[in-house]
Amino acid sequence: MEHINYFKDTRWKTSFYRLSVAFFFALFVMPAYFGIDIKVFDLSVQRIFMLALLVFIFEKRIRSREFLDIIKNNYFTPAIAIYSFITLYTGGLRGDVNAFLRPFIDLVCFYLLVYIIKNSLGVEKTLDLIYLYGYLLCFQGIIEFLMKRSLFSYLETLKGMYSGAFIRNGSYRVMGPCNHSLSYGLLLLVIVPLACYKYKEKEINLFARPFLIIMLFINVILNGSRSSLGLVLIELFLLMIFSEKKYQKRNGLLIMCVVFVILVMVIFFTKSGPAQYILRSFATLVDTVLGTEYAVRYGAESERLAQSAEYRKQLLNIFHVSFLNPFIGRGVKRGFAAEINGAFIHSVDNFYICLFIKYAYPGMIAYILFMIQTLQKQVVAIKKGYKISVVIIIALSAFYINLWYMDHLMTIKYTYVLLAIFCVECEELVNDKKKSIYLK
């Protein structure tokens, strides 16, 4: 009997491990618009694997108890519970089940990620998977730019989520497996810092994986998001500063070589489409920061840029719109549209303002406090010598800042991947209970 139980346990571990790898593949590589349409609820391939993993966990009492203990003992649970309660009463009062269900699924995903990283994959294997999927995304991004269509778009089975090809100033913007080009920029902001971490050595090195970093940077440029480009440059600068001293000289030489190659290519092929695209991307970023109009020289539309700047100013006035209840949000099923100072606003490209619209001040403040808590815990970990928290806080900060310029567009789960890695690697800071006794 003991031999049979051991065999079953080993078989379960193997099956769960393979399912966990498939889940990570679905999370990073498969589009959210690929799945089964059951009308009432979108069962994406990511959610299918989530459900399968949860069934595996809850089929045995000891595993389900471990999962529930992770929820109960996690440092972030009180903040998550408060936010979840707000989404719950908002959904109830507004008759909007998705107002609670959508964020709830993402938060369950967070705890599930903690469980599978802790009890199955391990942090090192998790990072290796992210690097592998990063390579796949980058190669696909270049092919997509040449084809002017995402290869993942052929997998669309859940209608209404995929935004279609996005072209601005005559240039196609790469979106990878995401439903919008802006959301792909958010995903890249998460992967870039992780690519600079050497797990076995517990070291940061900007060019720990030089080919991956260069490919990621190319994808950021092809993505065409000004905020993502600016923030990834800040990320790379910070990662260069925090790299171990023994790598500084080599990294400096590599940076000069990369910049030199880019400059030579741009100078010799200035009139070509790719060179104009690169110049326009950087010029648009400079214009945004300095208020200049250099991007116009490379094909950007000055009127569109001016309209974008004015639009963002008007977004702040949404806090004063009379028909929004400051204490009870509208939920997610009701769209937002309003005329503000003569401008008609129907698309809100700001995650924090979207939170206010959906969950009013209580929901917005609760989630912002949760965000602050995640950053504060990284600072504590850095003081205790955890180098991995340096790359996590850089990635989280860049992501959170970028949410000022866009909604999360179904990418908030990637911050939960970062937090799950942190919760396992720095377990003593988020959980004072014993480690798993079931799986090693």
Image (cartoon, rainbow, N blue to C red):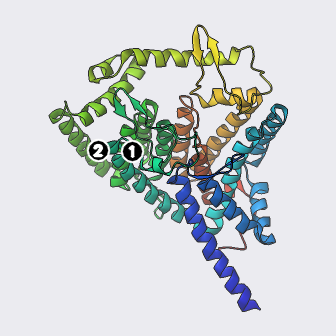
Residue placed farthest to the left in the image?
A: 268
Residue 368 on image: x %, y %: 67, 34
Which quadrant would residue 96 be assigned to in this image?
top right
Q: Which quarter of the rendering shows the N terminus?
A: bottom right
Residue 176 on image: x %, y %: 45, 46
Q: Does the CB distance between marks 1 and 2 fall below 8 Å?
A: yes
Q: Residues within 10 Å of mark 2 (few under 14, many from 20)?
A: some
The circle on residue 240 is 1
Would residue 423 be seen by someone viewing this image from the given angle? no
Q: Which residue is mark 2?
A: 255
Q: Residue at x 41, y 35 (%)?
A: 229
Q: Which quarter of the rendering shows the C terminus?
A: bottom right
Give the vertical position of 77 relative to 401 (above or below).
Answer: below
Residue placed farthest to the top in the image?
A: 342
Q: Amino acid at mark 2?
A: Ile
Q: Residue at x 56, y 29 (%)?
A: 404
Compare residues 49 and 418 and report the one nearer the observer.
Answer: 49
Compare residues 113 and 40 and report the one nearer the observer.
Answer: 40
Q: Residue at x 77, y 70 (%)?
A: 59
